């Protein structure tokens, strides 16, 4: 006689396995449909560009042409064909090159030709698109980008920044909301400020690769999600509490590999107690990351305090598998020249600034330009 409990358990396992299969299949279906949609929009963009160039249309006519085309396509195929969306499809084609298989083009209810074959054999590619030296979207990257992601990327004018965001969206599987936030907070530009010219090239070609503590850090950190008003007085405890209330967003802002360990971690020596504001662990660097929060300007005393924390953690908390801990003094303001003197030759302690609002694009771009000019002058 069968044990009813065993049968029930086996049934539960079967249901669980079927559920896993269905979840994977549905995710794959959504991903496949999405990829086909993105490629379809690219192909529509190609048709629009070739029609315009073939007819040698004037700009004035082009506007009217897209307006009429939007009306007709909407009438025939429903939503998704507004003038602005057609302009994005056109821009998508002019910005990127796609080489991938897509067998969804139907003629008389039969697959007559894949878009990939059409793309490879088409001899009518426009002179305009040839001259643009367009980047190629790989099948791997393309499969992880939705049309909404593409629209965000098309709004990024700098090609190096756009290439960086393509890679990061695909590798980190950022949602559209998260990708938008990273672009608006100018993640690429903030990472550039802590790089040399070789690092800048790597960012645009490979995304953020973390091999050293410097690779994992940003300057400034953007904490606009905390809702703290710069005009109001608030304490370090208020900042810490706000970060804990938005821990998931803070970890996203910290970046790759960060895991939360503790807040107000206590150190006791000879009945004297000290507290480290925040402790994280970076699994890529295999290091503890200690964060000391400051509502004011970075001071040399902050360095001494953090040095004490790191020495304690190295001796008392780290295992043989751990690398040396890293310290971040996260401050509201800092003088870069002063910081350079205080932290000269220091490899494990960093003074980083935080912002409570999204960065001013013009000011940050000016800083990036200075950094690039510095790269170029050092090479001469």
Image (cartoon, grey):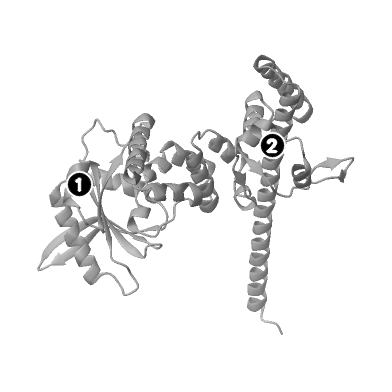
Q: Residue at x 63, y 77 (%)?
A: 5
Can residue 220 be seen here? no
Q: Residue at x 63, y 73 (%)?
A: 9
Farthest residue in the right direction?
108
Q: Residue at x 65, y 53 (%)?
A: 27
Number of callouts: 2
Q: Which marked residue is nearer to the observer: mark 2 or mark 1?
A: 1
Q: Residue at x 28, y 66 (%)?
A: 324
Report whether 10 appears left or right of 279: right
> Which image quarter is the C terminus in?
top left
> Which image quarter is the N terminus in?
bottom right
- Which of the pair 338/58 is nearer the observer? 58
Q: What is the secondary structure assignment of the residue under circle 1?
A: helix
- Which of the pair 222/56 is nearer the observer? 56
Report whether 78 appears left or right of 83: right
Q: Position of residue 318 (x, y in %)?
A: 28, 70
Q: Position of residue 336 (x, y in %)?
A: 22, 42
Can residue 194 be seen here? yes
Q: What is the secondary structure assignment of the residue under circle 2?
A: helix
Q: Position of residue 308 (x, y in %)?
A: 16, 61
Above or below, comparing residue 36 to residue 229 in the picture:
below
Sooner in the amino-acid sequence: mark 2 or mark 1? 2
Q: Residues within 10 Å of mark 1 (few under 14, many from 20)?
A: some
Q: Position of residue 356 (x, y in %)?
A: 31, 37
Farthest residue in the front direction?
380
**Tag shown at residue 339:** 1
Which residue lies under the disc numbered 2? 41
Image quadrant where residue 189 sits: top left
Image quadrant where residue 363 sits: top left
- Which of the pair 66/340 is nearer the observer? 340
Alpha carbon distance from label 2 to label 1: 50 Å
């Amino acid at each position: 006689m069968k044990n009813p409990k065993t049968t029930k358990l086996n049934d539960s396992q079967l249901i669980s396995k079927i559920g896993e299969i269905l979840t994977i299949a549905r995710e794959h279906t959504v991903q496949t449909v999405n990829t086909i949609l993105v490629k379809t929009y690219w192909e529509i963009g190609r048709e629009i560009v070739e029609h315009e160039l073939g007819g040698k249309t004037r700009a004035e006519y082009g506007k009217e042409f897209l307006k009429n085309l939007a009306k007709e396509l909407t009438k025939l195929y429903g939503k998704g064909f507004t003038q602005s969306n057609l302009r994005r499809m056109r821009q998508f084609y002019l910005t990127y090159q796609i080489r991938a298989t897509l067998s969804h083009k139907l003629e008389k209810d039969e697959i007559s030709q894949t878009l990939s074959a059409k793309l490879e054999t088409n001899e009518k590619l426009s002179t305009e698109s040839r001259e643009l030296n367009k980047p190629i979207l790989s099948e791997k990257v393309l499969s992880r980008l939705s049309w909404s992601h593409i629209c965000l990327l098309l709004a990024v004018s700098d090609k190096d920044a756009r290439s960086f965001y393509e890679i990061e969206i695909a590798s980190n599987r950022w949602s559209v909301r998260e990708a938008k936030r990273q672009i608006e907070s100018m993640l690429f530009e903030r990472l550039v400020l802590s790089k040399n010219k070789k690092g800048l090239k790597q960012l645009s070609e490979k995304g953020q690769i973390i091999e050293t503590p410097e690779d994992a850090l940003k300057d400034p950190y953007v904490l606009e999600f905390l809702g703290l008003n710069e005009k109001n007085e608030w304490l370090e405890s208020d900042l810490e509490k706000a970060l804990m209330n938005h821990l998931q967003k803070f970890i996203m802002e910290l970046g790759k590999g960060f895991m939360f360990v503790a807040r107000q971690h206590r150190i006791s020596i000879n009945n004297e107690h000290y507290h480290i504001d925040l402790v994280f662990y970076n699994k890529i660097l295999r290091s503890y990351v200690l964060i000391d929060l400051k509502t004011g300007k970075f001071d040399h005393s902050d360095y001494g305090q953090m040095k004490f924390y790191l020495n304690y953690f190295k001796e008392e908390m780290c295992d043989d598998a751990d690398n040396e801990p890293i310290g971040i003094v996260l401050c509201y303001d800092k003088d870069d020249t002063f910081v350079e003197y205080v932290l000269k030759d220091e490899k494990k302690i960093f003074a980083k600034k935080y912002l409570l609002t999204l960065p001013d694009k013009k000011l940050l771009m000016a800083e990036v330009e200075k950094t690039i000019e510095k790269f170029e002058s050092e090479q001469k």
